[in-house]
Structures are given as structure tokens and as C-alpha cells.
Amino acid sequence: MGNSFGTLFRITTWGESHGAGVGVVIDGCPPNLPITAEEIQVELDRRRPGQSSIVTPRKEADSLEILSGLYEGRTTGTPISILVRNTDQRPSAYDEMLEKYRPSHADYTYQAKFGRRDPRGGGRSSARETVGRVAAGAIAKKILSLGAAVEVRAYVAQVQDIAMAPLAGFPALADVEANAVRCPDPVAAQRMIERIKEVRSQGDSVGGVVECRVRGLPAGLGVPVFDRLEADLAKAMLSLPASKGFEVGSGFAGTLLKGSEHNDPFVIREGRVRTASNRSGGVQGGISNGEELFFRTAFKPTATILRPQKTVDIHGAETELAARGRHDPCVLPRAVPIIEAMTALVLLDHWMRDSAQNRAFEFSLS
Amino acid sequence: MGNSFGTLFRITTWGESHGAGVGVVIDGCPPNLPITAEEIQVELDRRRPGQSSIVTPRKEADSLEILSGLYEGRTTGTPISILVRNTDQRPSAYDEMLEKYRPSHADYTYQAKFGRRDPRGGGRSSARETVGRVAAGAIAKKILSLGAAVEVRAYVAQVQDIAMAPLAGFPALADVEANAVRCPDPVAAQRMIERIKEVRSQGDSVGGVVECRVRGLPAGLGVPVFDRLEADLAKAMLSLPASKGFEVGSGFAGTLLKGSEHNDPFVIREGRVRTASNRSGGVQGGISNGEELFFRTAFKPTATILRPQKTVDIHGAETELAARGRHDPCVLPRAVPIIEAMTALVLLDHWMRDSAQNRAFEFSLS
Amino acid sequence: MGNSFGTLFRITTWGESHGAGVGVVIDGCPPNLPITAEEIQVELDRRRPGQSSIVTPRKEADSLEILSGLYEGRTTGTPISILVRNTDQRPSAYDEMLEKYRPSHADYTYQAKFGRRDPRGGGRSSARETVGRVAAGAIAKKILSLGAAVEVRAYVAQVQDIAMAPLAGFPALADVEANAVRCPDPVAAQRMIERIKEVRSQGDSVGGVVECRVRGLPAGLGVPVFDRLEADLAKAMLSLPASKGFEVGSGFAGTLLKGSEHNDPFVIREGRVRTASNRSGGVQGGISNGEELFFRTAFKPTATILRPQKTVDIHGAETELAARGRHDPCVLPRAVPIIEAMTALVLLDHWMRDSAQNRAFEFSLS
Amino acid sequence: MGNSFGTLFRITTWGESHGAGVGVVIDGCPPNLPITAEEIQVELDRRRPGQSSIVTPRKEADSLEILSGLYEGRTTGTPISILVRNTDQRPSAYDEMLEKYRPSHADYTYQAKFGRRDPRGGGRSSARETVGRVAAGAIAKKILSLGAAVEVRAYVAQVQDIAMAPLAGFPALADVEANAVRCPDPVAAQRMIERIKEVRSQGDSVGGVVECRVRGLPAGLGVPVFDRLEADLAKAMLSLPASKGFEVGSGFAGTLLKGSEHNDPFVIREGRVRTASNRSGGVQGGISNGEELFFRTAFKPTATILRPQKTVDIHGAETELAARGRHDPCVLPRAVPIIEAMTALVLLDHWMRDSAQNRAFEFSLS
């Protein structure tokens, strides 16, 4: 349980870090969408290891194969199964992990839960699991873009204590992709990259904050009570490896304001109901209000570090562990496409659910 | 859609602020649990209006009736239906809301989504909807306590910029309930109460942060990938009216540390695997590690304020609105039992899901 | 678990035969539907006891109250909660059942499953549970009729060995309601009524077959593989108390034909693709083909009979039991509105799911 | 949507007849189960084409690969992904199907629903889709057998009008597998085989009835109301290609009896509560009563026949179609392992759901 996400656009991911491969099955994709493996590959390439000097040098091409659900280049409405074979497996690099629990990893908790675990590279708890999310998200992003002109953009806003300058507007994809850390502020980006290289040279790691903005959403997306848009986004973000926090709109900082300072006044702009400010972050009562959706996700520093750490082994003895091998000193650059994928999955699923209840329920009850 | 929560212990809430009543149906409650309406009423009384000088003076007894699922004082395993009639209805107080969208409320988004709405007191978007959550949570808390010795404790940690002192240990319920603001630090509590009264006298409002701790959880609760324990908790918290953020363990502050500072070393204590620190917040890879579960939820200042605000009406004209009547200047004290309820619902549902896969998660109600 | 039905139009029923009441919560009803308690009451009256000389004389007005989800006579898109109080309770009539398991009832299996049970009138296993289904089905029927011109008609086709003559066309509601047994063939109906009175006078009971037809369905409703239209209908029918079989189209009798005799040739009629015969029963590959939907449900003879029967008591001793009181000698007449309700629930839910994936997904991907 | 089955032991199948392959992802498999590809292959071999003289001669080895979820020969509790590559693809055999709708197939309804379809061999509507079900069912059967001593046995009971003699007891697997038609009555089996060969020589096809029995179930499995055991079994059976009917226990024939003849008296046998007869089919009120579970599924004659049939083409013109190539003249022999698989999936899922509520449903895999 727990390996599926979504109600109507529903994905199920599978696979371990050093097993035969990883993948995803997408159930509920609308028919007639033109999509190619190449388009999906573009997103996998943004996520894959070895893409720049500040991510893990592990060499994994992450070439995908679409096994079902397409016919003559278009979706048929049947499940889309996507497979990525694992290629760069060095299980011997993990010999020590067979016996020792890595601090702040899931080794101990998997053992406690399942009574056994695949220790090779963290098995299912490896961030390699997110390959399937990104592949499915690429399809969701295309549907949102093509069918609804909705655009999702994530970027690194903070690395440790280095924060970017405030954004002038919705950042261009090119500005995000212009540097290895995926921060659209080039000055901050340079400092972030230096910091990441510095901690890597110390055998250490850093975390930070990724922001995500969505433009083009109409007012009315989402549902009241338990499946509020921000609730489903919070779940999506906290389901990511290494994430520790989520905030929408004004978030934690908003707790310092008074109501009279915090409320977003309604105004009429270009004939539409708009808000003068956006401390709500584009969502009110769980439903989009037509403003830019805005939320932030906190990531802890990578748990895997090369410095020796205290831990215990599976026999209950205290010991030391120092990771060897190839690791990300900072997960944030590679988290950017994953956050975009999860956001697109949440939005598309709500879009489809909403279409069942109002707009798309194609008859008038009046 | 969106009015149900949980997989195996599944609740469905219904009802509007000024309709006939509010309630909940609980499907999946284990049989043989002794429970009375009085025990559930205790939790509803912690949530109800009029309980102290710093919450809304609205008079609503919130007396519950259990309509099904019990026989001779014990649950039978069939659905438990709970009804609370609405009594203090003054719909005329909402006349203005028929025409004007309240800023940072859900009036406009409900209208955009559904094409119509119940404007009396916010209808379904009213915090009155949480009555059903608290009633169901009371049952979940009893099961966790009786069957598994798990204890859930929420409290107000911050009101605007007033933060409590660090806690010495797991706070006693009596210390939380000792003051009207539900903060176990009596000095900070006094300042918080004064602040709330001050902003109320200004016709304004404040927000803050509620913390929640859980003790008694074994290692191994939760599942990998999408339904991680912290992901489900994040969703539960962001489903609450007025919540804007969630963080588990070190949260956003943890992004400032390096991995070598942030990781929780494993140690052996009293023959068990433990961590020397708890920046993980009791959860690793989505699964509990046997330490105290710890998370924080941010609430914005109450959207309803008595000062005049700019807004627009349903005809698209710009106008002004000033709330009348009885409102909470700060939602946090009443949010405490709601957060405990939602936390208990998440934990019990995972407990039951795990018990299907792992015999360690068993509990006896006899 | 198991008390909810549907994915997007989702109902949860609750209540026991001799508890405070029975009811249903409907989540996912589209907004803006005009509906009154009186319209729903019409369907409850078709299901209620005491309505004719061949059903149980138990006196239960089954007056419903709508507790939420409506505003000014129309649905708001929020959950609709419906309550029917129990009034005619004679628990003493069930004293013997406290100790003895009624043959072919659920007394023993509930005890085995839950370890305890509400013995008053069968508790949750009583057919009284279907009140909530019928109330929800009344709303579903209205949406299908108003929004999609889909009409659902069930009727009694066979009582014990007495079968109706073949139907000339889609039967009129008035013809079904023209007699107490709800069989549109008046000659057969008369014989059925006599048979039912005869077995009742013997303290015995009979079963039979209810047929259901749906007209107005477009081609394309339903989904491949697990949630085929006929699969969901089969589940709905086998979820009814006393049902033992389901068949769609040619059903069991179709197994006697060869493929060349059984296949439905496609033809063009009035410019549309039609089939020359309808042994498919209106569904091919789990998806409606635009022909009349046709299926049959078998009901066993009522388990409650007044004649003495061998059984065992809760202490494990063999004994005898003879029911007292008021019972249906044949469940079929009252099953007719329940089958219509369940059919409408299945069709509307699929309609809404389909609207999310194609027709109603309101943008073009071409 | 519609490609997943089960709640806690949840499978998702994917793949088309002539695409890259077919497969299944299983989420919720308990950890620590020893299982090999070879054990699963045994069940796939019972389902595969070319296995005998009365099934389609299509040559498809159906060799499976387990891509995830196992470590050192045992399940880890993470998703199990299984892939079977398609090998014997002759898309040219389906050229005519590009233009013409095959009678009583899903060509037209898929087109109506999705607006497009994969015409090669029926695409997703092909019975090849059941490969994934059988693979998942093999695992479910092993868990039931190993952990709970539950045994599932299906067999062909009737081909057209040829019915087997009544069974003396629970049939041995060897007796079912002793002949190509999978009927444990060798005399009837011989006649069935001759009939199948005869209709095949005529370019025609036949249907029939498969029975399924389950022994070893304790009393108490299943849930009341919508997810009754027989309701979930009915859905599982009606989800199979070519199935048209389902009956449990006395089924349609039971409608001819009176209650006094039909009820199953309770008796005490070997210290346990048992029933003297089993017209209930092992289930009462949706819950197993500890007797043998017994149900029957009707299959229509194979829709694909070699004789010319009237139909229409995609341009709306009436035309003729005669299938070419390799087809099953009778689907029943290959349906036997599929029915066992679906039955095991239903039972195991209920077992796991019950284990969350009732400690009696536990099993050890160690």
C-alpha cells in the first residue's frame, strides 16, 4: 500500500535502487494525447544523476521505454506503463549498509516495519523511486499545458542560508535551467553552487527551500474539507524524500501579521474578481481563486555524508559508519523537476475530479 | 467528493454552519470498544464556542447524539453515525454576506466552483464543519490510548510573535488546559491572552503556531512513498481551516544546518535502537522510528475582522465590508482539540493498515 | 469498511433495524439540482413495510429529513445527509434471537466476524439498511432522468415457478405499480400474488427473479477491465440482502447457444450503429453499446419463516426456532425500488467518471 | 481508471494484445513470502495459448520477469512488478479489424468511449489482459495456502448442454488437470472435448459454466452491506471477458424452492457450528460461515468465429466479416486458472481487511 497517488489520474510507482529497474503505471490518462518517449525523457534528464558538477556523478542514462497505452503516437485511454532499467549498479558499495543503519535514512524503520529490507542503495527508500513520478508528471504537465494553458514552475529559492532575491514575475524556464542549481537569480545561484561545492569538499551536505508557482489556473479548482488543493499539495510535497516542511502563500511568516494586514482584498481587474495581494497563495477554502498558486517546500541536508557518524548495527551494537561512493551533496537541484511533476499530478487529478462535478458534467440542471 | 478521510478507519463529515446540523459517519471502527456519548462530548466541549473569554461568544451547546453502531455501550463494528443539531442560528447576521465576498474567506471560490453556495455563516466552509472531525477523533484517541498506549498532545506554541519557552518534556494535558489559550507555558500564555484581547478590542485578529507531540508509537508505523506518515499528517493539517504551513521535526529551520549537524545518530538505549537527537521528528522514510512524533502547524490570523475592508460584491462592483457579530479573534485555542483529532485519525488509520500487513500492529480492546 | 458505494457519487449508509434510525450521506452530488424531501419520500414509500397486503405489516412511516447539502431547494455540491428515525420498534419480538441463530440469516456470521452483534431485528444485517440506498438512488435517478434522459425500470419477472410473459417493450412505470407484486404482466401478477398469500398462510416463503432495464444510455459508458459496467452492476445486485445470482443479457441461458447464434450483428439504423439482436444486454467489453441495458437478479425465498426450524444457540446446543411477528413472505416487490436505486447509483457514478476522462474533460487535445 | 482491483492487496494490470507486453503491479503484498518466477510461471502456463489441442494455437511462451519487490527470494513488502513481453505478433491478421467492428466484441464500444482504439488483436480488450491477473493470483493463492490453508479450485462444469455429473467431494487438482477441458468428470470431459472440436471444425464456438469451490475458510470473512464476499466475487467474475452470469450457492435454481426447503439448518458437528446443507454457498449476510464457498460463472460462446457475419464498418456502412487466424473455440479451459486467480485476490484482500479489524485473521509467512 501507499505506492499509488491520485484518484482519477492515478499513478502507481514501483522499483528499487539496485533491482532490475523502476517504473510507473498511469491509469486514467485521457485518450488522444500526442506524447512521445522523447518528451518524457526530457524531464527524466532533468532529474537524472550525473547531469552537472554539483550532483552525484552516478552514471545512469535513465532511458525509458513506454510499454503500453499508446497507439500511433497518441494515448488510447488505457494504462500507460513506463519502464526504466537500472544500469549503474555497484552493490558492493553498499556492503557496509547490510550491517549498519545509516543515520537519518530509512534503513532502521524499513527493518522495523517489514522485518526485512533490500539494503542495496536503500532499495525502495532510494530517491531513485521518483523516476516514475517524473515520467508520469511529464504527461500530466503536457495535458495541463496543452489542454488548459496551465504552467508549473519550480526553482531553488534557498540553499542553507543563501536566499535568492525576490522575483520580478513568473520565472522563465530558461532562467531556471540557466545554472546547475536551478535558481533563477544568477547572483544567488553562483553563491549556492559555491556553497554546495564547499560542503561537498568537506564530505558534508546542505538543504534548503524549493518554491513552486503555477499560473493559468482558473478560479474553482479543488474541493472543500479534506481534499483541499493545499492539503493534497502538502501531502505530495511531504511524500518526497528529505522534505521536512510545506507552506502555502504567507505560510509560517504570515503568523506574524494581524488579520487586517494579512487579508487579501478583493478588487475588480480587467472585469474579473481578483485579489490586490496574494498572501492566500492562490487558494482560499481549499479552492483556487484564480491568482498564482504559490508554495514552498523545505528539504533537510542530504542524510548521506562522507564523514564518519555514530550509529548502530543490526545486531544492536554501537558502531561508526562513513558513506563511500557517489552522492548528492544537496538534493535541491534534482528535486525541482520532481516537485513540478507532483504538482502537475495534483492539479490534473483535481481538474478531472472537478470536471465530473460541474463544468464537465455536460448537462444543465437549471 | 473530498468529505471523507482515511482508508480503514474512514470518516465522512457533513453539515453546514446554519443548516439543520453537522455530523460524521465513521466506517471501520473495530468492534467491542466501550464508548459513551459523554466521553465524546468532552472533546466537543474543548472545541465549542463560548468556552472562554478569548473565543467567540456564540452559544452552541454542541450536544451530540449517537445514532448507530453501538449496542449495550460497545461498538459493534458497524458504522457509527453522530449528529449535532445546530441551535444558535442568527442568519440575519449574514445578510451582507449574501452580496459581498468576505476577503480571505471561501465565499468567492465556492461560488466559482459550485455556481452557488449557502451564504449563512459560510455554510460548509465554516469551521463548524470540524465538529464531526473532533467527534470521530475522540473515538480514535480512545482506541489508540486503550489499545496501544499512544498519547497525542497538541498545544499553542506561538501567538503572533509571542513564543513559548522550550518544553522540558511531554506536556501534561492539565498544563495545556490550565489556561484559555492552551499553552503549557503559563508566562507566555498570559502574554498570548493579553495580545488576543488587545487585537480583539481593535476589531482585528492574530494567528500563530500549534505544536503536536505523540508518544508511545512503536517503530514501524507508516508506509513508504506516497502515504508516508508525515505526508498524511501534512494533508490532515493543511485540510484545517486557516492553516498555511506544516513542518515535521526540524522543519524549515533544519534547512540552515549541515548534514553532519542535522543527522540523528543511532544509539542503543535500554536495549532498544534509539536516536541521540530527534531532528527527524520521530519519522524516517515515512515510517515512525520509535521517538516522539513532533510537528508544527501554522495558522493565519482569522479572516473575519470587524474593521472595514475593501472587497467586491457578487455583481462585480467594488465595495466595503465590515463583519458584525461574534467571531474568534484567534483560532488557535479551539484548533488544539481539532489537531489532536486529526492526528489520532491519521495514526489509527495507519495502525489498522499496518496490522493487515504486520502482526506487530495489534491491539486488544477487551 | 464496506458501508460506502461509488467513487465520485459516493454514498455511505448507516443504521440498524432497531437503533435510533437509519440514513445515508451522499458525497459528490453535483450542485444546482432541484430536489425535495417529498420526491425522495416517493421512493421510500415504494420500499416501506405495510404498503400492501403481501408485504410485512410492520408499521414504519419512514419519514425522511434532509439534514444538509441543500440551500433554497437546490443542491450545493456539499454532502447530503438524510435521516430516517426508527419508530416501530418491538425488540421483545426478538428475545429468542438473542440466544438462537436464525437459519440462513447473518446472526452466526456477524457473531463470528465481530465477536458481538446487535440482535434486535438483525441489527445492521436487516434489510432496513436499504432505506439509505433508496434515498440516495432517488437523487441519482433524478439526475439521470433530468440531465441525461436515462430511465431505469425494474419489475418482478418470476415468483417461484411463475414467470411473466415476454415483454412487448420497455414497461411503463404505471404497469409495474399497477399491482402489489410489481409485475407488469397482470395475469402472471395475479398468480404471483395468490402464490405469495398461499405460502404465507403456510408460514413459509418464496423467492424469484427481478429484471431491470435501462433505456436512454449512450454508447460509451463504462470502463474496461475491472470496473466494467456489468461487473459493477453485479456487485451492486449481489450486495442486496437475499440475492443469489446475477445475469446480463443472455446470461446462463446463453451458454446453450453457439457463437453464430449468440453474436449480435451490427447494423445501421436511423444513421446509428445498432445491433440486430441484444443478447449482449446492452454492454460489450464492459461498456454500453447504446442498446437497452438488461439484467436479472435472483432472490432466494425469505429466510424468516414461521415454521419451526432446527438450529443451534450461542452456547453451542442444538435447538428449534420459529419466528414470530411480522415478516415479508416474499422480498421481491419491495426489492424493485432498491434495484432501481442501486442501478441508478452505478450508472451515475460511471457517468461522472466518464465525464472526467472524455466528453466532459472540456478541452480538445487534437 | 478501472485497471486496479483490491483495497489492501491491490493489483493494477496494463498492456495490450499486440503492444510491447502485458503486466501487473501488486501493491500491498506482505513481506517475507518466499516466491519464485517459476511458481508464478506454472499458473501462466495453465492460461497460455497453445497448451492443448482445443485452445488457440497462437504461440506465446508468456515468460515472466519479476522486476521489483523481491530480495533474496522473498517479498520485501514493496510493489511487485511483473512483465511478460509479447512475442507472437501478427498484426497483419487484424487488418480487416481496422475497418470493421467485430460483432459482440468491444471494438465499437471502445471507439465510442475513447474516440480511438488499438485495433491490433483487440488491444486492451483482448483476453491477453488477464495475464497480469493470473500472475498476481498465483501470489495470492500461495499466501492463502501457506498462511491460511485455504484452497481454491475451479473447473469446467458445463460446455453448451453437456454438464458434468455431481461431484463426490472437493475435486483434486490432478483430476481437473487430467484433461484438456479441465473438467474433473472424465466422461463428461471427453464429450465436451468432442463438442469443442466439432464446433471448431464448423468455424463456430461454444460457451458454458465454470464452477469454483474454496475450502478452508474460517467463519467470519467478509463484510456487511456493499463489500459482501459474494458481491466482490460477482464483480470479479463479471469483470472477466465473455462472462455473462454469476450465482452463489443455490443461485437461480434456488428461486424455485420455498423457504422451508431452502434454509440451511444449523447443527453442531465436531464441536463447531455448521450447516446441514449448503444452499447458502458458504456465505451468509456477505460473510463466510465456515462451509465450502461455492459459486458458478456463465461464459458466452467465443465471439470470434470463422463464419461470415454481418456487421458495419467505421464509416457506417453495412458489410461482412469473417475472422481469420487462431482463436479459442471455447474460452472455458483457459478461464479456469483466471477464475482461481480472481477468487484468490478477492479472498486475500478481504482477509487482510479483516485482519485490520479482527485478530482472528492472521497468518504467518515465516
Image: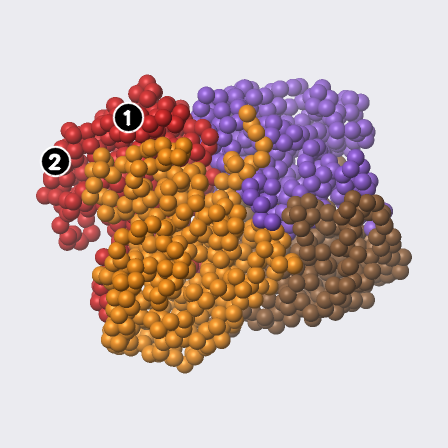
Chain colours: A purple, B brown, C orange, D red
Amino acid identity at mark 1: Leu
Q: In this rendering, is residue D327 above or below B243? A: above
Assess disc 2: are there few (<14), some (14-19) or many (≥20) residues with their C-alpha within 10 Å of its C-alpha.
Answer: few
Instruction: Kindly indicate the quadrant of the structure image that contains residue B284.
Output: top right
Assess disc 1: are there few (<14), some (14-19) or many (≥20) residues with their C-alpha within 10 Å of its C-alpha.
Answer: many
Residue highlighted by disc 1 = D321
Of residues A318 and D345, the one nearer the viewer is D345
Extreme left residue here? Answer: D187
Q: In this rendering, is residue C93 above or below D187? A: below
Helix, strand or loop for disc 2: helix
Identified at 49% across, 50% down, the residue is C145
Residue C191 in the image, given as x and y percentages of width and height: 25, 66
Helix, strand or loop for disc 1: strand
Q: Is residue D152 visible?
A: no
Residue D365 in the image, given as x and y percentages of width and height: 37, 47
Of residues D232 and A216, the one nearer the viewer is A216
Of residues A350 and B10, the one nearer the viewer is A350
Identified at 58% across, 32% down, the residue is C363
Residue B243 in the image, given as x and y percentages of width and height: 72, 49
Which chain hosts label 2?
Answer: D
Instruction: Kindly indicate the quadrant of the structure image that contains residue B254.
Output: top right
Instruction: Kindly indicate the quadrant of the structure image that contains residue C35.
Output: bottom right
Which chain hosts label 1?
Answer: D
Of residues B48 and C146, the one nearer the viewer is C146
- Of callouts 2 and 1, the N-terminal one: 2
Q: Can residue A361 be seen in this view?
A: yes
Amino acid identity at mark 2: Glu
Identified at 53% across, 24% down, the residue is A34
Extreme front residue here? Answer: C270
Give a yes or no on whether discs 2 and 1 share a subunit.
yes
Residue highlighted by disc 2 = D194
